[in-house]
Each structure stands twice: as C-alpha cells, then as structure tokens.
Amino acid sequence: MAKIRLGILGATGMAGRSAVIHEENLKQKGQDYASLELVTGSPQSQGKNLGEVFKEKERDLSTRYSFWDQRSCPESYSQMKVHGLDAEKISKKVDYVISALPSAVAKEIEPKLRERGVNVFSNASEFRWKNDIPLIMPEVNPDQIKRVNEQSTKGVQVNNPNCTTAGFTPVLKALERFGLEKVNITTFQAISGKGDKVSGSEYASNIKGNVVDDWNKRKQYNGEEKKSELEPVQILRGSTDRQAAQKKGPDISVQTARVPTQFGHLESLKITLSKKVDREQVVDAIETWEPPEQVRELPTTSQTSLKHVQEQPEPERHLHHGDGMGVVVGDIRQLDENRFSMFCLSHNLRQGATWKARQSMELYLKSKDLI
C-alpha cells in the first residue's frame, strides 16, 4: 500500500517538534505508513533547516531551565527546509497534515487546506466547537469519526481536545458505568504546555520556585479551566454546543496551575458517582478498561491506555508509560459511599497534543482501509 503524503504545520513549535519526533518513532517501530514531505514554521524559522531550529529552541529552553532535557531533531529530517503557510503550495505536496498551529493561525489556513482536498488533524482549539468537525479522543469516542462524512469540503478535519482534558477524560470513561455526577479537578501542569513562550526571561523568572496560573488579564478568566470543563462533556456526551454541554453534565469544575517541570500534567480528581461502589470496584474498572478493538490496533495506541499504581504517579517515574500515550492513575481513596479521590498523570505533548492528533488520523485511515 502506498504511503500517505504527510505535512506537519507548526513543526518548529513545542508540539510540532513532538510531532516530528513521533514520525521517527513510528518509523523505528516499523509503522512506516507515511512519508513526511513538508514542515512549516513561523516567519523567523522559514528557510532554515529543521534541525537548526530544533537546536536553537531546545538550547534556549535548557539555558532558562536547569531541568530541561534537550530534544534533538531526528537525523532523517534535520535537513528539511522550513516552509511558510501557503495553502496552494501545501496542497500540491501533501494529502494529510498534523496541525500544531496557534489557534489564530489555524483559523485562517485550515479551512483553505480542506477546500483544496487536504485532510487536517488539528491540535489547535479554533474549531473544537464547530458542529461538523468532530472533537475526538479515539480511545473514548471513536464512533464520532463518521461525522467527517457530513463535511462539505474536499478534505476532512478532526480536532483533538486540550492537553488537560486528554489526561482525565479516559478515567471518566472508565468510571462511566457507575454514573458520573460531579468531578472536581485541580491540575499541576508542565510548562511545555505553554509552548516556546516559556523560554522568555520574564516567564522563566516567574515560574522558578513558584506555581503560576494561565490567568488572562484582559478577559479576566483562565481559558485552560473553561476548556477543561466543557470539552470532556462534548467528548463523553456528543454535545457540539457550549451551553448544551454545560447543562448535560457531568458537572465538571477545574482549577489549573503550572509547575516547573518539563513534561507531564498531574491532575487531582474528586469524583462523585451515581452508584454506591467500593474502592475495589473502582480500581477494577480502571485496570480492566480498554479502548474498542479498532482503536487498540492503531499504531499510536498504547497497549495499556490506563495503568493503575498504588501511589501518586510522578513525571520522573511514570511519564512514558505506553510511550507517553497512556494515562497513569494512582492514590485512589474512597471518601464516602460514592465519592473517590485519585491522581492521574499524562504526557501533555503526546497524549495531550500532536500524538493524539496523529492517533485520530490513524483512526480515519483505518476507517478507509488505508492502514
């Protein structure tokens, strides 16, 4: 079977660099179903070799943070030239793209690509609430992939949720059998989720030895919290309208914070269930839950989507479970007859970003018998 022609949009950014590493990761595993034909980047990066940009950006981050482990561009892609966002030129080179673009940029270019027959799998937030574009976590709501058939453009589009949602939503799915009434969440999120802006001196000096939030002074709210309260309901209940999602439930409230770690979003969950169950039943539900068969067969899917440990999961010890595509759940406590607390940990650039977009692309390809 011929390889698909793939492009990575925003390949020089934090999540985009992760997408490039993922392409090499799949190739090393023998899952070589795509040919990376094009990478795009910001105006400052255009015309440079991808490997050069990798080195510059990772060096800047390691200069700011002593804990930063520099990532290298895979040798096979290091000499690729970084291109700009020209929809016509992109459509002549590729048929599929993984988009790691900022939302404002995605808003302009992604529709133009779809119109020209390019299939878009996007990590950007811009189209997560557009009725005909499904918001998909393949292990949770794979049936939503059929909604791309309702799209009127030549190319299709699928979006994945924000990195916080990607961590705890599989846990909620596993416990759904007991009825979900209320979920209170506090997050401790790695700085890489903010992108390369964390290499700036102001942010770096503020986060050192500190815990900060993503408060938007102009809008007077934390956008991470809003997204993380509504997107899980859309995924679990199929809501495509924000107001409807708020009414449908479960009732989810989220408070988010950034902590000085490189990768990994740790989330503290307090979950109220409809049914009276004991801790053993909750643990068993998490340990035995698995995605549908068609998702388990995808190259990017972890062999164990949920892993239970007795203690609180830690980024240093548990981050790369399932190659970063699994969620680790631990320190499960029963608070009363239907209320439980626990922690979960996920890799924010893999489970929570472009690797998840790649998994959605694989789900689409499988639905078309292309992999």
Image (cartoon, helix red, strand yellow):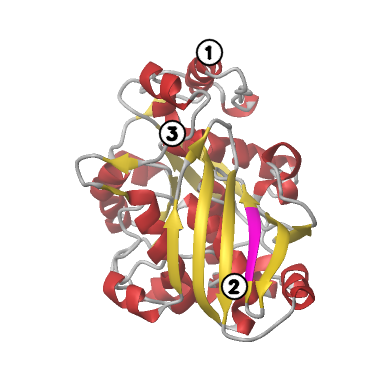
Q: Is residue 341 magenta?
A: yes
Q: Is residue 151 magenta?
A: no
Instruction: Count neighbours of disc 3 (C-alpha within 10 A) and say few if under 14, some if 14 to 19, many if 20 or more.
Output: some
Marks 2/1 in contact by CB < 8 Å: the verdict is no
Q: Is residue 319 found left or right of 156 in the rendered image?
A: right
The quarter of the displayed image where residue 263 is located: top right
Q: Would residue 131 appear left or right of 277 to someone viewing this image?
A: left
Identified at 74% across, 48% down, the residue is 321
Q: Which residue is mark 1?
A: 63
**Amino acid at circle 3:** Gly
| 315 versus 150 height, above or below | above
Residue 45 coordinates in the image, percent (x, y):
38, 22
N-terminal of the pair, mark 3 or mark 2, is: 2
Q: Quadrant of the C terminus?
A: bottom right
Task: Say which residue label 3 marks.
Answer: 195
Secondary structure of residue under mark 1: helix
- Cα separation, mark 2 vs mark 1, equals 40 Å
**What is the x, y in percent for residue 335?**
66, 70
Q: Amino acid at mark 2?
A: Lys
Q: Judge whether 164 appears above or below 338 on screen.
A: above
Q: Circle 2 is placed at which residue position?
A: 173
Instruction: Give 345 or 154, whichever is nearer the viewer.
Output: 345
Taking the image as drawn, is residue 357 in sight? no
